[in-house]
Amino acid sequence: MTVKKVASLLLICSVISAFHQAEELLFKVPTNWPKPAYNFEKNPLSTKKIALGRSLFYDPQLSRNNTISCASCHNPFSAFAHVDHALSHGIDDKIGTRNAPALMNLAWSKTFMWDGAINHLDMQALAPISNPKEMDLQMNQMVAKLQTTKKYPQLFKEAFGDSIISGENCLKSLSQFMLTLISSNSRYDSVMRKQATFTEQEKNGYFLFQKKCSSCHTEPLFTNLQFENNGLSIDTTLNDFGRIKLTHLKDDSLKFKVPTLRNIEFTYPYMHDGRFKHLSEVLNHYTKEIKESKTLSFQLKTPIKLSSNEKVDLIAFLLTLTDRNFLFHPDYSYPK
């Protein structure tokens, strides 16, 4: 091999190495966490693409009448959930059928929405944008609208090298921003890293959590990423039977995706239809109000018993999952 070829090879290797180092800085897997499910090789992270996705996330121009943005239902100060309403509120004050789920640690998920209707993060944003009750804007309409602005052709050129906007690049940039929404710096995480210790009450709560809750809300993501029937009674107004509507399988009746418990202090109201405002109501459901059915989660077949003091201890532990660094992270807020 000639000296010139060796030099070229070394240059290529150094560029690749620098690329991976830069990507690692933009997305770092927390210590002892599993490998993400998202394939970053098909949508390599870059600062410009993340910034573009952040701008789009907060932009109401992604709705038909320029009134609703992604952030309208996914507020950063409530862990990208929507605390004001049990059911999501969208365009023209229309009301959806489910509670807006919190957004965090999405790189580890293979399915999205309460029923798993979306199976890739790059397609997830398309669902609320095109939903007639949420943002009511078709992809071609969104692209045409953004193309006429002064702002976006330049941002797309900086991010993707082309000022001609495409739907694919819109969705990929939104994914890039959402991938950066990592919550891994709660008090619980500090304890796991041996940088802090639980109080006696939190320690009792953690023991109860491991014994009663962790099979579905598995550490460190605090979700097993599966679909479960958690024994809720049917809301006869909504008549929402969950994942069966998507799969048409009887075994999926009344099953919804298990949500993460991270930042649960700020992601109320709880359950797929936002029926509970307080954690105490959630615990009362699991200890007193479980509805038996053929698809009831195996973990709930045996009744959960908790005394009043144990419920208080369990809630004390759940509050250790609040990650204020995530809630108030300047890189996640409205871009000024």
Image (cartoon, rainbow, N blue to C red):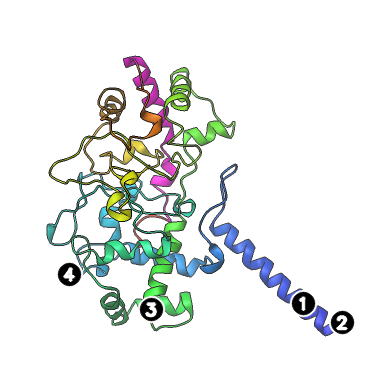
Q: Secondary structure at mark 4?
A: loop
Crowd around label 4: few <14 · some 14–19 · many ≥20 (10 Å) = few
Q: Position of residue 226 (x, y in %)?
A: 42, 44
Q: CA distance from mark 2 to mark 1?
A: 10 Å
Tell me the residue that label 1 is attached to: 9
Q: Quadrant of the N terminus?
A: bottom right
Tell me the residue that label 2 is attached to: 1
Q: Main secondary structure of the magenta part?
A: helix
**330 magenta-colored:** yes
Q: CA distance from mark 4 to mark 3?
A: 20 Å
The reply to whether the C-beta atoms of the residues labelled 2 and 1 are less than 8 Å apart is yes
Q: Secondary structure at mark 3?
A: loop
- Mark 2 or mark 1: name the one nearer the start of the chain: 2
Q: Secondary structure at mark 2?
A: loop
The reply to whether the C-beta atoms of the residues labelled 4 and 3 are less than 8 Å apart is no
> Identity of the amino acid at label 3?
Ser
Tell me the residue that label 3 is attached to: 166
Q: Is residue 227 above or below residue 280?
A: below
Q: Position of residue 251 (x, y in %)?
A: 34, 44
> Identity of the amino acid at label 1?
Leu
- Mark 4 or mark 2: name the one nearer the start of the chain: 2
Q: CA distance from mark 2 to mark 3?
A: 43 Å
Q: CA distance from mark 4 to mark 1?
A: 53 Å
Crowd around label 3: few <14 · some 14–19 · many ≥20 (10 Å) = some
Q: CA distance from mark 1 to mark 3?
A: 34 Å
Q: Quadrant of the C terminus?
A: bottom left
For residue 241, say whether it is visible: yes
- Mark 2 or mark 3: name the one nearer the start of the chain: 2
Range of residues picked out in magenta: 307-331
